[in-house]
């Protein structure tokens, strides 16, 4: 087992900097497209054997130092009773939005092993195959709440912020129900064999720091506190969250994920005695090979004082990224960091 990723999460000395990429199992890989061509996205998420195949692809093809479970953050919302649809070009859709107490009352806190057993089966199968650690994950409550309230993706989050400011009790009740469900979901993933867990807060960056502290952070803290019993690394990633780093450190996570909007050296000073994960702009993978290697070398050098550093992108790899560019990045990280 190559445990370099786990060592870096714990701040232990490693022979080189480990690398994995958010959304590394996905649309940029022709091998993924071949699998995806025969099933819908939700069918893929609910087929353990296919999920295993696409989870393994970037590890085998590109040499990643960790695998991340192939799934979607909204699978849990569907299990809670919110009918979920995916449409090409428009992303996830919840036609039954949660904007009043009656709609909230229809949501349940599901038994994770029963409602999302296919996720746990995928984890168990992957642990039999993998020679690198497996990362499980869930969406952070605030991010999941925005999808339920807005009915899908949003640019302005009008309905979300309207509920926060005008009906805070309703908003907190929704956050509590998502939090309780997420705790059970991630605990089940840990029992199934996930070796690290990440909370994705994709939309946290839309919040002012004071609102993040009131409406989002307490629920992240509750989830991570409930996972400490498993003694595995816990990662928190607030996208567009450079202004939230001081607060994110208080989340209870062992590793703080970084987007690309802050120099990594500056972020490390704020994070202190925690490992960091990130923070290459995903579009930097389009740079010519020499310039990409130079960019990666500078980032590695700037991260030299980190308690631990896992190389990653500042967000998910873009679907039109040539796979050979991702391979250049993986090889460069391994080579340059081992010198």
Image (cartoon, rainbow, N blue to C red):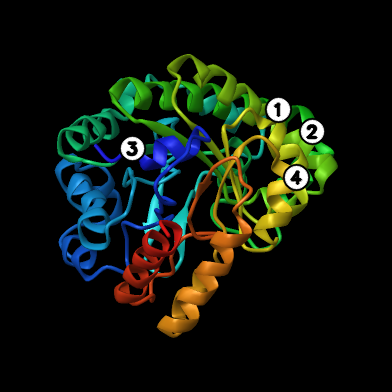
Can residue 138 be seen here? The reply is no
Q: Nearer the viewer, residue 65 or 23?
A: 65
Q: Mark 2 or mark 3, which is nearer the start of the sequence?
A: 3
- With respect to residue 138, does 67 lie above or below? below
Please indicate whether residue 155 sits to the left or right of residue 194 in the image.
right
Q: Which residue is mark 2?
A: 214
Q: Residues within 10 Å of mark 2 (few under 14, many from 20)?
A: few
In the rendered image, which quarter is residue 252 located in? top right
Residue 164 quadrant: top right
Badge 1 marks a residue whose secondary structure is helix
For the residues labelled 3 and 4, the Cα–Cα distance comes to: 27 Å
Q: Residue furthest top?
A: 229
Circle 4/circle 1 CB separation < 8 Å: no
Which mark, residue 3? 3
Quadrant where the N terminus is found in the figure: top left
Tell me what residue is drawn at x 50 percent, y 60 percent.
Answer: 313
Give the residue drawn at x 32%, y 69%.
Answer: 327
Q: Give the mark toward the camera: 2 or 4.
A: 4
Marks 2 and 1 in Cβ contact (< 8 Å)? yes
Quadrant of image for the C terminus = bottom left
3D distance between C-alphas at marks 4 and 1: 20 Å
Residue 308, percent from left and from top: 54, 42
Q: Nearer the viewer, residue 59 or 140?
A: 59
The residue that disc 1 covers is 218
Q: CA distance from mark 3 to mark 1?
A: 31 Å
């Amino acid at each position: 087992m190559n445990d370099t990723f786990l060592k870096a999460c714990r701040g232990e000395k490693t022979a080189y900097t480990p690398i994995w990429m958010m959304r590394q199992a996905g649309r940029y890989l022709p091998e993924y497209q071949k699998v995806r061509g025969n099933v819908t996205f939700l069918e893929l998420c609910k087929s353990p054997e296919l999920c295993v195949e696409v989870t393994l692809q970037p590890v085998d093809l590109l040499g990643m130092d960790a695998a991340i479970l192939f799934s979607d953050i909204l699978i849990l919302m569907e299990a809670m009773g919110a009918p979920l649809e995916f449409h090409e070009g428009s992303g996830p859709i919840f036609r039954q939005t949660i904007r009043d107490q009656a709609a909230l009352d229809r949501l349940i806190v599901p038994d994770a092993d029963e409602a999302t057993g296919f996720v746990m089966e995928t984890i168990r199968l992957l642990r039999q195959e993998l020679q690198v650690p497996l990362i499980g994950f869930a969406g952070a409550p605030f991010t999941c709440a925005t999808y339920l309230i807005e009915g899908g993706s949003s640019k302005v989050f009008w309905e979300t912020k309207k509920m926060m400011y005008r009906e805070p009790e309703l908003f907190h009740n929704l956050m509590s129900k998502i939090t309780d469900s997420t705790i059970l979901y991630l605990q089940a993933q840990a029992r199934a064999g996930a070796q690290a867990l990440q909370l994705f807060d994709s939309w946290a960056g839309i919040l002012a720091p004071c609102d993040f502290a009131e409406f989002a952070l307490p629920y992240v803290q509750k989830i991570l506190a409930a996972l400490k019993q498993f003694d595995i690394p816990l990662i928190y990633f607030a996208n567009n969250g450079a202004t939230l780093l001081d607060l994110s450190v208080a989340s209870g996570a062992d590793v703080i994920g970084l987007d690309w909007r802050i120099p990594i050296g500056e972020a490390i000073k704020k994070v202190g005695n925690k490992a960091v994960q990130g923070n290459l702009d995903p579009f930097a993978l389009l740079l010519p090979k020499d310039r990409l290697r130079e960019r990666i070398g500078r980032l590695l050098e700037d991260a030299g004082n980190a308690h631990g550093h896992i190389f990653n992108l500042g967000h998910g790899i873009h679907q039109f990224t040539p796979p050979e560019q991702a391979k250049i990045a993986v090889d460069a990280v391994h080579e340059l960091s081992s010198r």
